[in-house]
């Protein structure tokens, strides 16, 4: 459990929090149009695109792809395995929203990334820089 902005206890697995970012007006208009064409809310669209984009930032060893393998999802599974996982999630209930399906299939990637980054920092391979706002490889 952790404490939310309103001071109440929250569970990272069940409670939702807002994420705010600023983009140029033309980009928001493009995203809005694309979300409408896909019949998605803007939140659903951004969340889906971020999750899809994260694939390219993970090595194959960490469960990602090199970007060329379209038959693998963010957890390193092939298309048939993903189909099995979707069917498994859907077997317990009549209907699940896109968001619920996406969350159930990708929730462990955040934990895996956090653990991997912690290990890489312990091994002095990666360093976090608050000044630069992100992670970088340690010069050797």
Image: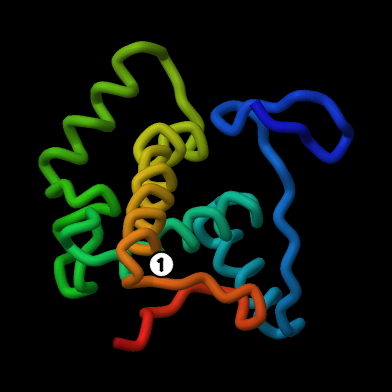
Name the image quarter holding the C terminus.
bottom left
Residue positioned 46% across, 37% down in the render: 103
SS for callout 1: helix
52 in relation to 16, above or below = below
Q: Position of residue 50 (x, y in %)?
A: 49, 62
66 in relation to 106, above or below = below
Mark 1: few/some/many CA within 10 Å (<14, 14-19, 20+):
few
Q: Check disc 1 and report the residue beneath it.
A: 53
Q: Indicate the quadrant where residue 63 lies.
A: bottom left
Q: Indicate the quadrant where residue 90 lies.
A: top left
Q: Position of residue 83 (x, y in %)?
A: 19, 37
- Asked if residue 41 lies left or right of residue 80, the reply is right
Q: Indicate the quadrant where residue 139 lies.
A: bottom left
Name the image quarter holding the N terminus.
top right
Q: Residue furthest right?
A: 6
112 in relation to 11, above or below = below
Say which of 111 and 36 sits in front.
111
Residue positioned 73% across, 84% down in the render: 24
């Amino acid at each position: 459990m952790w404490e939310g902005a309103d001071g109440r206890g929250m569970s990272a697995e069940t409670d939702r929090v807002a994420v705010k970012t600023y983009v140029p007006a033309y980009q928001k208009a493009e995203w809005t149009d694309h979300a409408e064409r896909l019949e998605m809310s803007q939140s659903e669209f951004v969340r889906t695109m971020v999750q899809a984009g994260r694939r390219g930032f993970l090595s194959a060893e960490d469960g990602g792809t090199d970007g060329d393998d379209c038959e693998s999802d963010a957890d390193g599974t092939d298309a048939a395995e993903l189909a099995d996982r979707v069917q498994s999630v859907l077997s317990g209930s009549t209907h699940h929203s896109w968001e619920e399906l996406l969350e159930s299939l990708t929730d462990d990637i955040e934990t895996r990334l956090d653990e991997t980054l912690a290990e890489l920092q312990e091994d002095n391979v990666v360093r976090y820089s608050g000044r630069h706002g992100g992670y970088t490889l340690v010069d050797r």
